[in-house]
Image (tube, rainbow, N blue to C red):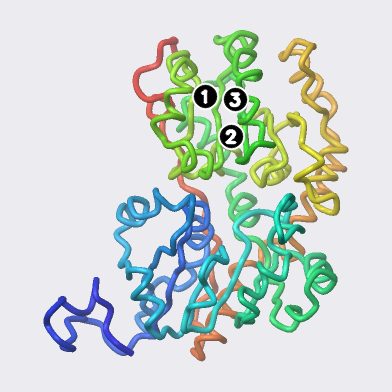
Amino acid sequence: MSALRPIGRIPGAGTRSYLTVVGCKKILAVVHTVTYAKRLLDVLPLLEGDFRVQVVFTMPPHVFGDEVPAFLARLGCAVVPWEEAVTMEFDLALAAGRGGVERLRAPLVTMPHGAAYLKRIVGTKDPGVAGMRRIDLLPDGKPPAAIVLPHKAELRQLRRHCPEAAPYAVVVGDPVHDRITASLPLRARFRRALGVAEGRALVVAASTWGPWSSFSRFDALLPRLLNELPRESHRVAMLMHPNAWAAHGAWQIRSWLARCRQAGIAVVPPEADWRNVLIAADWIIGDHGSVTLYGTLTQAAMLLAGPPTQELNPDSPAAALALTVPALSPTHPLVEQLEYAAAERWDAERKAIAGRITSEPGRFARNMRSLLYRLLNLGEPAHPPVTRELPDPPGWAALVGGAERESA
């Protein structure tokens, strides 16, 4: 295999290698968007400490990919340009998106970038459940080495939607589910890090992206968050899908939300970890995105801001959640609705819905590491894989963009 330009060969120096650690198995992490990058970063730590393996990154063209170079640069990743990566051979490639992966010269492992195949694609030449269409599972008709699934129910769906992909499917679990559940005991610490004082409540407004997301209607919700929640007893944090930031630009998002941030509402940036904020919440006001579904794992009470039937997969746990959690009313006072949601929690129903996120709870690290090393034709390291706890969230002042205009 040829050396890698950013880490192994100086341009113009011929074929001479400048690597220090040589003879490694080469893994290519295919990063289309920040969202996909975050999912891969829940997988790659399973290879930590193994000097037999070298991971490099590449960035295929993607409409939401503008922020990826800066994101990978902050991590200090070795990056191979896409047009060079597709000419090279790798021992394994990992991807949470499908764009261009049929061009790779490596055994490919594909995985979902969110929870439980919640959305339908409509109005295109390839309609269907996102992630379950033939174009998603077998790009250009080329089968991958493995299709990673979170739940055995998805295996049944895959057999129905694309039976020729079934031989490549492996049920391994969900890394986000496992990291959230492992970090639930840290809730008090996360709240302290956010500056949510004793006796104060944290309301998290969560949105997916696109014209059917709650962010597309935030102009109706924002005045209520600003004006109806008592500042002395409530804090508000906003979690928006990185695709919304990428599509409109960070400057525009900050401009739209400038008044909110000035009023002390926290806006979690796309590069930050949102899961610790979710765990810290007392209430989640969400839509049909993955963040809301993962919220069922926490102790937060929930309200739903109108999931659309057009985009919602009717067989998904998000559809079941929409029938269980109360819908946000435009006419009743917001505080009363929050109190109602806290009093009527539907914990048994929520637990059942959360159980549909993965059929391998707590076992993603074990299952995924076994799969990776089997495909690499390497023996697994002689220690159990670890599900890492989530890091502390940033301080509140950082999330509102400076000093708060309210007293602590």
Compute the Cα span from label 1 to label 3: 7 Å
Residue 307 at what x, y percent from top left?
Answer: 76, 36
CB atoms at circles 1 and 2 under 8 Å apart?
yes
The residue under label 3 is which amino acid type?
A: Leu
Which residue is at 36% across, 72% downward?
A: 83
Quadrant into which the N terminus falls: bottom left
Question: Going from the N terminus, do you reach mark 1 or mark 3 first?
Answer: 1
Which residue is at 32% across, 63% downward?
A: 77
What residue would you read off at disc 1?
A: 196
> What SS does tag 1 mark?
loop
CB atoms at circles 3 and 2 under 8 Å apart?
yes
> What SS does tag 2 mark?
helix
Question: Would you call the spot at circle 3 few (<14 residues within 10 Å), some (14-19), or many (20 or more)?
Answer: many
CB atoms at circles 1 and 3 under 8 Å apart?
yes
Residue 280, disc: 2
What residue would you read off at disc 3?
A: 202
Quadrant into which the C terminus falls: top left
